[in-house]
Image (tube, rainbow, N blue to C red):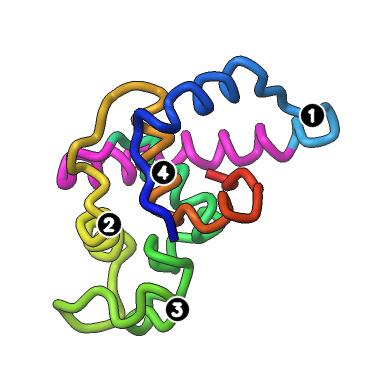
Amino acid sequence: MAKHALEELRSEYNRLLQTCEIRADKLTEVQDICDTILANKPRYEAIATATSVPWFMVAAIHSLEGSLNFKTHLHNGDPLTARTVNEPAGRPKNGSPPFTFEESAIDALAFDKVAVNLEPTFAGICFKLEGFNGFGSRAKGIHTPY
């Protein structure tokens, strides 16, 4: 897999922002996701405080990896009742299951180094979010859901 750099992708991310539209048939679904995220903002903010990753990034990852289910690992949506099985397997390394969502989220963000060199721009945030999920879909010409 090719290694990507923010500068290589910056203009693409910014172009996608300028052309992004929510389809009318998805508006209710998007609003429901936003409402759920905002209702749980204090939980995301606590993780943000512990990790220096903005709360809305934690929420975006949680939506895509765990469908906003607080009984799943932020790493990949596996149940918190055991260490992760799917990639990355065996997380968190420390502690004993069952894990709290917050414990797992802090581990996931540290494991993927989301706060490291996080540029607080739209492109910088997109780059880190895409990196969390991986750049593999790019090789297939598919934009990541992130």
Disc ID at residue 129: 4
Q: Reply above or below: 14 against 52.
A: above
Write the residue at 60% across / 41% down: 33
Q: Residue furthest front?
A: 2
Q: Foreground mark, 1 or 2? A: 2
Disc ID at residue 1: none
Q: Position of residue 47 (x, y in %)?
A: 24, 47
Q: Marks 1 and 2: CB-CB under 8 Å?
A: no
Q: Position of residue 7 (x, y in %)?
A: 35, 28
45 inside magenta stretch: yes
Which of disc 2 and disc 1 is earlier in sequence? Answer: 1
Write the residue at 58% across / 54% down: 139
138 inside magenta stretch: no
- Badge 2 marks a residue whose secondary structure is loop
Crowdedness near tag 4: few (<14), some (14–19) or many (≥20) residues, C-alpha within 10 Å: many
CA–CA distance in space, label 2 to label 3:
15 Å
Occupied quadrant, residue 76: bottom left
CA–CA distance in space, label 1 to label 2:
31 Å
Identify the amino acid type marked 3.
Asn
Which of disc 4 and disc 1 is earlier in sequence? Answer: 1
Q: On the rendered structure, is 131 left or right of 22? A: left
Identify the amino acid type marked 1.
Arg
Q: Reply above or below: 69 against 128.
A: below
- Badge 4 marks a residue whose secondary structure is helix
Q: Residue furthest right?
A: 25
CA–CA distance in space, label 3 to label 1:
32 Å
Which of disc 1 and disc 3 is earlier in sequence? Answer: 1
Q: Which residues are magenta?
A: 29-53
Q: Residue at label 1?
A: 23
Which of disc 3 and disc 2 is earlier in sequence? Answer: 3
Q: Marks 2 and 3: CB-CB under 8 Å?
A: no
